[in-house]
Amino acid sequence: MDPLAQTLSTLDTILLGKPQQLRLCLACLLARGHLLLEDMPGVGKTTLAHALARVLGLQWQRVQFTSDLLPADLLGVSVFERNSQQFEFRPGPLFTQVLVADEINRASPRTQSALLEAMEERQVSIDGQRHGLPEPFFVVATQNPHDQRGTFPLPESQLDRFLMRVTLGYPPASQERLLLAGQDPRAALAAVQPVISAAQLLQLQAQAAAVHVSAPLLDYVQALLAWTRDSGRSGRGLSPRAGVGLLRAARAWALVQGRDAVLPEDVQAVLPAIAAHRLLPQDGSSDVLLIQTLLAAVPVPD
């Protein structure tokens, strides 16, 4: 079986009834992006984050973000060693291939900001020294709704580091029935074996980056970006970095679908997850409605 199809099949046994969301998550990682899973407690965000880490066969660490978590708890500290009479750096849990940041918005803004350099440059600077992170490196974070107590909204600069924000929602009735009947996703998660190795993942990322994008499709993406900036419907438009991320994600989506060229529907499939957390609707409408309006307003290339 194709490794991507096998990966999706394995994930589908853990998070029931969410094929679109699973494909988005896999495309995000193939595009070398960080992933934010946002929804209310109890819908499977943390389970999915753990499943992604396990099925990809990567080293991973889970950190429960709380209000008293300090930056050093993530990054590590320099400790003075008597024998060598020198400070030696002891890396924190951030030095892994997949960091599962559970309930990231329960940590203080100071601790949240400790991830900025790591997510953008895949390195951290501590005591004037730069320390590289493993390759590949992903942050898979979960986030509770902002209206819940004890949460600190992620600043725009932090949100922009996440290539995609994916919302899971409630499961379909037929799949929820299986859960109620005793099918435990945690038991399925415990039995998960790696499907893709780190070396294979790097190869797949290279394949995704090589997926062809035609000139008319580049025109289409530019028109989408321009609409978010010029229509007056959003308080802020999509940045050039968001545009680059949109193309990376569309390439990865096309690869997941088994194609070697990007089609307009690939861009449309990933756009909500790329744009929703970066736009600011001006008329009080939802980000979902804003993106629907965007896709309807911009002509699709022939």
Image (spheres, rainbow, N blue to C red):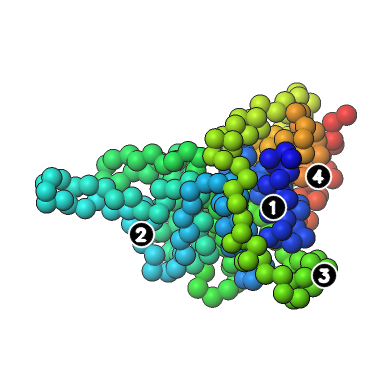
Quarter holding residue 110:
bottom left
Amino acid beneath label 4: Leu
* Residue on which the image places disc 3: 173
In this rendering, position of residue 58 left or right of residue 72:
right
Instruction: Estimate the x, y position of residue 189 in percent, counting from the top left.
Output: 62, 61
- In this rendering, the answer to whether 286 lies above or below 90 is below
Q: Residues within 10 Å of mark 1 (few under 14, many from 20)?
A: many
* Residue on which the image places disc 2: 73
- In this rendering, the answer to whether 59 lies above or below 180 is above
Local secondary structure at mark 2? helix
How far is disc 4 from disc 2 in space, using C-alphas? 43 Å
Q: Nearer the viewer, mark 3 or mark 4?
A: 3
Identify which residue is drawn at 76% across, 76% down: 181
Q: Are marks 1 and 2 in contact (CB under 8 Å)?
A: no
- In this rendering, the answer to whether 221 lies above or below 81 is above
How far is disc 3 from disc 4 in space, using C-alphas? 30 Å
How far is disc 1 from disc 3 in space, using C-alphas? 21 Å
Quarter holding residue 173:
bottom right
Instruction: Estimate the x, y position of residue 217 in percent, counting from the top left.
Output: 77, 29
Q: Nearer the viewer, mark 1 or mark 2?
A: 1
Amino acid beneath label 3: Ala
Q: Residues within 10 Å of mark 2 (few under 14, many from 20)?
A: some
* Residue on which the image places disc 1: 10
How far is disc 4 from disc 1 in space, using C-alphas? 32 Å
Q: Are marks 2 and 3 in contact (CB under 8 Å)?
A: no
How far is disc 2 from disc 3 in space, using C-alphas? 41 Å
In this rendering, position of residue 198 left or right of residue 30:
left
Q: Nearer the viewer, mark 2 or mark 3?
A: 3
Amino acid beneath label 1: Thr
* Residue on which the image places disc 4: 295
Instruction: Estimate the x, y position of residue 206 in percent, counting from the top left.
Output: 61, 30
